[in-house]
Amino acid sequence: MDTAVLRAAYDVLLAEVAAGGFGPPPPGDWTAEQVVAHLTLNDDLLATATEAVLAGAPWAYYNHNAVHTPELNELISGCGGLAGVADRLRASSQRLCNLVDRLDVLAADTPVETHIRDGDRIVVDEPLPWGRTLDIHERVHLPAHTDQLRALRPAA
C-alpha cells in the first residue's frame, strides 16, 4: 500500500502538536495530551493488527483501550506529559507506516473483525478489508483529531 497520504496526515497532526498553545477542552472532551495518547495507543493497536495480517494470522481490531481515559492518562504520566507522549506518537506512527508499506493488495483485502468506538458510540462493528480500516484512519480519524487539537487553542 502507498503510505503517502498516511504519512502526510501524521506530518500535519504532529506539526499541530509541536505548535502547542493548547488550552483546556470543553467539559467532557479530551485534553491535547489525551488526544495524542489516544493516537499513540491506537497506532499500537493498528500496528499489531497489521503485523497479524502480514503474517497471515487471524486477528481482530478493537480500539477500546485507545479510548479509555484511564489508559490515556497512564500513558501521559509514564511519558512525562505532552512532549513525551508526542515523541511516542512519532515513533508509533513511523512503525505503523513502515508496516503498512509492506502490505500488498492481497493483504490489504484481508478481512479483519473491526470494532471502532467513538466515545460511547459504536461506529464500526463488522469485518472490513484491512486496507479500508487503514483508509478510515488516514482520511477520517487523523484529520478529525488534528481539527480537535486546533480547536483547543484559545482564540487570538
Image: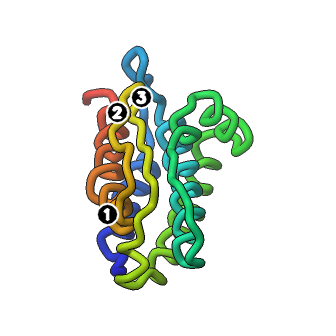
* Residue 44 at x, y percent in the picture: 59, 57
Residue 124 — which label? none
In the image shown, does 19 or 26 lie closer to the viewer? Answer: 26
Q: Amino acid at mark 2?
A: Arg
Give the residue drawn at x 54%, y 78%.
54
Residue that label 1 marks: 132
Image height check: is 117 above or below 40? above
Residue 119 — which label? 3
First reached walking from the N terminus: tag 2 or tag 1: 1
First reached walking from the N terminus: tag 3 or tag 2: 3
In the image shown, does 100 or 56 lie closer to the viewer? Answer: 56
Q: Is residue 78 left or right of residue 111?
A: right
Give the residue drawn at x 35%, y 52%.
142
- Contact check, label 3 and label 2, Cβ < 8 Å: no
Image height check: is 114 above or below 117? below
* Residue 35 at x, y percent in the picture: 47, 39
Give the residue drawn at x 42%, y 18%.
28
In the image shown, does 92 or 155 lie closer to the viewer? Answer: 92
User: Label 2, label 1: how many angstroms apart (C-alpha)?
Assistant: 32 Å
Q: Quadrant of residue 145?
A: top left
- Closer to the eye: label 3 or 1: 1
Residue 153 — which label? 2
Q: Amino acid at mark 1?
A: Arg
- Contact check, label 2 and label 1, Cβ < 8 Å: no
Q: Amino acid at mark 3?
A: Gly
* Residue 43 at x, y percent in the picture: 52, 56
